Each structure stands twice: as C-alpha cells, then as structure tokens.
Amino acid sequence: MFLLDFLKSYFLQPRRNDYDLLSEEEALHININVVVVEFNENVESSSGEILAAQLHAQKHLTVRYFDEPFSKSFLNLEGRTFFDFIDKGQAILAKTKADILIWGHREDGKIRLNFQTPMQYERSNSSFLSLLDSLYLPASLFDKPQDFPLPILNIIIGAIVAALDTPDKTAGIRQKYLLKKTINILSKDSSAKNLGIEYMPYIMNFLALIYLSYCRNNDNDKEFKVVNSLLATALEHKNLIKNPLHLGCIYNHLGQLHECAINMFSRKSEKHFKGAIRNYQLAQKHLGKYVYPYDYGFISYRLSDILYDYWRQKEDIQALRDSVFNLRETEKIFTYSLFPEFWADIEGLLGHRLNILSSLTQNNAIAELAINAYKNQQKIVTEKRDPFAWAAIQEEIGNIYYRLGRDKEDKDLLEESLEYFHDALYIFENMELSDNAKRVTVSIAKASDLLE
C-alpha cells in the first residue's frame, strides 16, 4: 500500500470546526530544540547526521547533531539495559537543554528511531508518546539524502511535535498548530514511497499518535474512529512485529484513545471504559513490570484511575479492588527514594481508595492500610511545607479513626480521632478557613459525644 493513498483515504479527511489556532505570525515564535544523537550503526554510515541535516532545513526546529563518543549497546531495547538508555538520554537532554532527543539504531537493514523528552517519565507529562515507541524505516532511505521521502520526514516531524510536553494552554495551542501544519503537508505530498508491508505497524502507530495528539480534546466521534482505524490497521499486521514490546505500545495507545473518549463521549462512556481497561491490561502483558517498569507503572497508574471512575459509575466493587491493586503496582515502581512527589500522590490516592473499600466491605484491616498510606503521604506533605494539605490529611485520618471507633465502640480509637481532628482544626483556624474549621468542629463534637 502506498503511504500517501492511506493518508488520503483514512487519515487526512477535510475537517470542520477546528479550534482557533495561532496566526502564521505568532507561529514564527515557535521553536523546538532537537538533538539527533549519532546513530548506533555497524556500517560506515552517518544516518544520524543525514537526518539532522534534513530536519535542520525545517521551520520551527533548531537541530544539533550530537556525536560525542559513548557506548550505545543499550539501544537494543533489552530490559536489563533500559535504565541506562533512559539515564544517558536524560544526561544529554540536560547538557544540551534540548526539548527532544532522537535516537537511531541500525539492525537488519532497518533504522529504528526512538524519541526521548525531559518529562517523559514524569507524572505531569502530557504527551502520549513513550520512549519505547519505535519508528522503523528502511536504512536505504538514508543512502540518498537528496531523495529522502517527504512523507517520512513529515512523520518524523509529527512525532517530534507529538512528543512535546504541553503544560499550559498556550503550549497546547502551539502544538496543535504545528500538528495541523504537518498533517496538511502530508495530505498534499505526491512523493510517497512504498516502504513495504513490514513497516506498516510502525507507520500506523505513529500516524495514530500524531492524529490523537492533534484531536485529543475534540468532541468528534469521527476522529475517534480515524485513530482507532489506524491502530487497528497496525494490529492487523501484528504478525510482522517480532518484539512484543511494540505490540504493548499499540495497545497502550488504544487505551489512551478510549480514555480520551471517556471524557468526550459521555453517552458511550461504558463502551470506552471497557475499551480503555481491556487495552491497558493487554499493554501490561506486553510491557512487563520487571522489563520495562516505568511504562508498566504509568499504565497501571492510568488504569487505576479508570477503574476507580468505573466503580463510581457502576458501583462494581471488583473495579475498586482492581483500582487499588494497580495503584499498589504503581507504588512499587515510583518509589519514595526516586520519585518522592509522585509517590506522595500515590499514597494519598491509596489512602482514599482503601478507606472507601474498607467502609464498603467493613474490613478494619483495610482501614489500617488506608491510615498507613495517608501517614506515608505526610513524609512528603509535611506541616511546615504545606500546612493546608497536611491538615486535610490529618482530617482524613481522623475520619477513619472515628468510623472505626464508632463501629467498634472503641474509646481509644475515638480519642485517637480527636487528636487528628484537633491538629487539623488548629491549622484551619490559623489560616482563617472558616468552612473547613466548622466541618472539623462538627466532627470533634460527634466524637466527643460518643465518648461521654
């Protein structure tokens, strides 16, 4: 299949009701710092330098070729060297102050590209793209740089833009502008090459990423179907994928697609809840926690939230149990020592969800786990550092002790609850938060009444 034919038929239909985008004049201020690392090649070639030159000619990109010598054995994508891959990339990103790092690895007549960003494994990262997402291309394309196919170059540019973290509205609008520009160029290009069927899953995966990044907030069922079709086409050729991690990436993006749809199409929410859960679980099977822990951990984190929301909608207690299980999986990976802020958020969510599960099942042991999780959160969220958040946690712990004391008619637990309530009240009164103070005062009165 010719790439351009596919784009025209399925990917780049005329669009209506686009969001307001930046003007061309405003867009001139957009600049992405890209570093292309010298490719890992066992032949006399400079494919990385060729790609850097191709990208250098593009507007909105500042490109540097990084050819400092170092071992690139970790580019084999084996789990035992994956942390070296991440760490070396982060070191280069910090040194060069780049927005995007492009890695290249030659194997069996193919070039594999991977894209790394500074925020890729941070909780706040807004991009759908993983370091494991791999774009395979024929190595022969780099032999004649003057004939490098424009559609392929624009897919690479689209991947660069899609990989960007967009923490604020302005950054999101700029990303949307560049993605639309890239999509329009692809739709008009007439120089597409037939890459061969073995490249289809990887091309489709990246086209899906580009389009999903562009239409992520659009309430348009047709756009959902477009991205779904691209990923379904990739899966139709899964027999061509030798490494299961690449399948895991495709299932992960299907999970992301359904998760976006949950927020956009409330009338079909149950369908998309089930689609997100099913595909994230499939992704977990292909991206094992002992091989690619960060990707597995992030999938577990997203899956936990979806399962929790599904429980809230359907009151399916097994979904709540599964939510807690996946959050526990996340906790094992994003630890206190390596990711203290993320770990604190995880502990807070665990405290909340374990408390609910304890209340529904009347299981006091689970309540104790909830209290421990909240206390873990306070290792990071201290009274000095964030008094309001600390007091809110004290109130939550007090509520658990109050419930246990009331149900078990245990005065010691009720007295424990009062200690936590008084701590919270002291902070709320000092901060002049009258509503919070009134609420805690009522809790204190209720606990005191039971002690009389």
Image (cartoon, grey):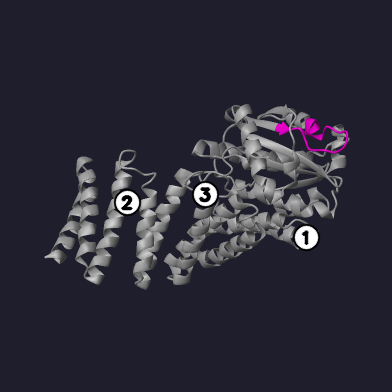
Locate residue 144, reporting x and y percent: 88, 34
Circle 2 sits on which residue? 393
- Dot 2: element: helix
Locate residue 411, reporting x and y percent: 19, 65
- Single out the residue that lies furthest toward the left: 452
> Which residue is drawn at the image coordinates 38% and 46% (left, top)?
379
Amino acid under disc 1: His
Amino acid under disc 2: Ile
> Quick one: quadrant of the N terminus?
bottom right
Q: Is residue 110 visible?
A: yes
| 255 over 18 or under it: above or below | below
> Which residue is drawn at the image coordinates 24% and 53% (left, top)?
420
Circle 3 sits on which residue? 334
Q: Which region of the structure is painted magenta? A: 36-51
Q: Earlier in the sequence, mark 3 or mark 2?
A: 3
Q: Is residue 180 visible?
A: no
Gap between marks 2 and 1, in whole Å?
50 Å
- Dot 1: element: loop
Task: Tell me if mark 3 has few (under 14), some (14-19) or many (20+) residues whose alpha carbon lies within 10 angstroms of its own.
Answer: many
Amino acid under disc 3: Phe
Front residue (pair 224, 326): 326
Gap between marks 3 and 2, in whole Å?
21 Å
Front residue (pair 46, 261): 46
Q: Earlier in the sequence, mark 2 or mark 1?
A: 1
| 214 over 32 or under it: above or below | below
Q: Evaluate if marks 1 and 3 touch, with contact meaning CB atoms under 8 Å apart.
A: no
Circle 1 sits on which residue? 237
> Which residue is drawn at the image coordinates 60% and 30% (left, top)?
94
Q: Evaluate if marks 2 and 1 touch, with contact meaning CB atoms under 8 Å apart.
A: no
Locate residue 142, reporting x and y percent: 84, 37
Locate residue 266, reporting x and y percent: 49, 62
Of the two numbered discs 3 and 2 in the rendering, the one whose residue sits closer to the viewer: 3
